[in-house]
Amino acid sequence: MARENLLLSRRIVLPSSIRNEIELNLSFNTCFSELHGICSFPTATVEFEKGELFSPSVYYTLMVRLHFADMQQGQKLGIFQNVLSLYDGEDLIKTYTKSTYLKEPSSLTKMTWFLFFPLYLAGFFHNYNILEVPLAAEYIETCDRSSSKLVFQLQNRFAQIDSAVLVIDARFGIIRHLLYNWPLTTSFIIFVSSLLELNHPSRVY
């Protein structure tokens, strides 16, 4: 009985996963007048089961990682908006918007690449083609209001994106952190504490 209660407690207080990385397949509409023209912003829609990505009463950080196909072309875009919307069915729960731009490496950085070219080819330096966009620091859901769909939109028609990934990180306090990262140790401590409590019940005077 104590073991079943322990497993149930861990299931309730812990999120299903500490991190999820969701591939965003960006697509757009072409113009009727020009078949090669782009007439909409690149958009990705992901549908999922309730509770699959987010557990109730757990704070999450949401970040999008964009990999641009061409750094020079990406820098010409200037500032653009990233919009992430979460839905409960067709009902909007929350929308996050973040303006950003692709930074250009400094002259010192380019010189370092040249001097250590083998290391540059091996990927030891920061890839300026990759842009990480933080969208939310404390996203939280409840049992009554949980998402089943998310929509990401990059609001620039000329952005050439190789790949886009939504990174979801669970944030929790010290107790949940211990339960998640040291499950055997914390489970043993809780189990022993439960046995001691059963063998020596508190007296009420």
Image: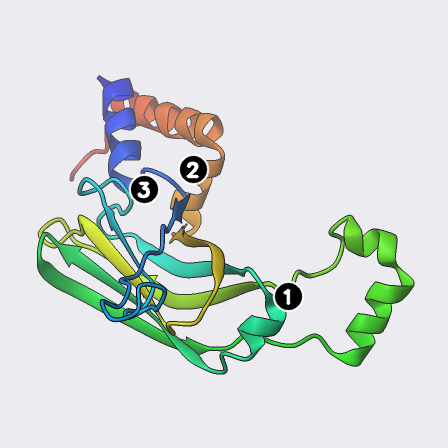
- Residue annotated with mark 3: 15
Q: Quadrant of the N terminus?
A: top left
In the rendered structure, which disc, 2 or 1, sits on the residue that comes first in sequence?
Answer: 1
Residue appearing at x 82%, y 77% in the figure: 108
Question: Which residue is most to the bottom?
Answer: 78
- Distance between the alpha carbons at the discs numbered 3 and 1: 33 Å
Horizontal side of 101 relative to 128 (left or right) equals: left
Q: Which color scheme does this rendered protein use?
A: rainbow
Identified by mark 2, the residue type is Tyr
Callout 2: helix, strand or loop?
helix
Q: Is residue 145 above or below residue 70?
A: above
Q: Between 78 and 167, which is closer to the camera in this rendering?
A: 78
In the rendered structure, which disc, 3 or 1, sits on the residue that comes first in sequence?
Answer: 3
**Disc 2 or disc 1, which is closer to the eye?**
1
Q: Is residue 182 above or below residue 169?
A: above
- Numbered circles on residues, count: 3
- Residue annotated with mark 1: 128
For the residues bearing labels 2 and 3, Cβ distance under 8 angstroms: yes
Label placed on residue 10: none
**Disc 2 or disc 3, which is closer to the eye?**
3
- Distance between the alpha carbons at the discs numbered 2 and 3: 9 Å
Residue appearing at x 66%, y 60% in the figure: 127
**Disc 3 or disc 1, which is closer to the eye?**
1
Callout 3: helix, strand or loop?
loop
